[in-house]
Amino acid sequence: MHRVHHPSYCKLGGFPLVVLAPEGTTANGRGLLNFRTGAFVLGRPILPICFRYRWRGLNPAWTIGDERWHFLRLMSQFRNDLEVEILPPYKPTFDELKDPHLFASHVRRQMASILDIPLYDASHDDYLVLRRRGVDVSWDGRQVIMSDDVNDRRRGAAHKRP
């Protein structure tokens, strides 16, 4: 991290461009997760790049589950379409320079507007917490799977309701 703060890394020609996924993952494309702030803390202009996956059988952005199985299914599809839209560079305002969360929020809102999708108040970390507690997603992404312990707790909570 120390090297990134050096001014020569942050000017044109000083360092090659780096592409970051500010959500910290790729999601299902139906909404934007909360952005992490790592790409925004330096206060440098951001070049937002929006991806639209046009899929039918398997969402190529799906990252939950066994990566080998995902890769096999992805390569078995007849075609995989991706539309890329590169937005104009977003230069932070004075307030955004002081607040990376605000900067990230405004870029996220702009991207969601272009993609015509909602903002989700969730993150990949939320999924990881659920997974540690026994909640997961099936290999095909179509079902939520809960451990017996989670199901027992749900049944107990349902019986306590008036």
Image (cartoon, rainbow, N blue to C red):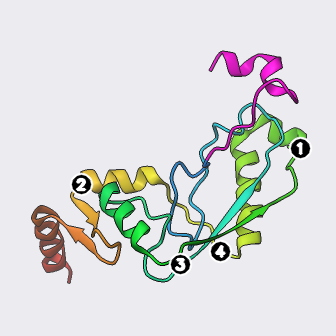
* Secondary structure of the residue carrying numbered label 3: loop
Q: Which residue is mark 2?
A: 133
Identify the residue shown where x is 82% and y is 59%.
Answer: 87
Identify the residue shown where x is 85% and y is 50%.
Answer: 90
State which mark lies toward you, 2 or 3. 3
Q: Is residue 1 left or right of residue 60?
A: right
Counting residues from the start of the chain, the first of labels 3 and 4 encountered is: 3
What separation in Å lies between label 3 and label 4 (alpha carbons)?
16 Å
Image x and y of residue 44, in percent: 82, 35
* Secondary structure of the residue carrying numbered label 1: loop
Q: Does the CB distance between marks 4 and 2 fall below 8 Å?
A: no
State which mark lies toward you, 4 or 1. 4
What separation in Å lies between label 1 and label 3 (alpha carbons)?
37 Å
- Crowding at dot 1, Cα within 10 Å, few <14 / some 14-19 / many 20+, comes out as few
Q: Examine the rendered structure and indicate whether residue 93 appears above or below residue 157.
A: above
State which mark lies toward you, 3 or 4. 3
Q: Is residue 121 left or right of residue 9?
A: left
Q: Main secondary structure of the magenta part?
A: loop
Image x and y of residue 54, in percent: 59, 77
Q: Which residue is mark 3?
A: 55
Q: How many marks?
A: 4
- Circle number at residue 121: none
- Circle number at residue 93: 1
Going by the numbered disc 4, the residue's amino acid type is Ile
Counting residues from the start of the chain, the first of labels 4 and 2 encountered is: 4
Q: Which residue is mark 4?
A: 117
Counting residues from the start of the chain, the first of labels 4 and 1 encountered is: 1
Q: Which residues are magenta?
A: 1-20
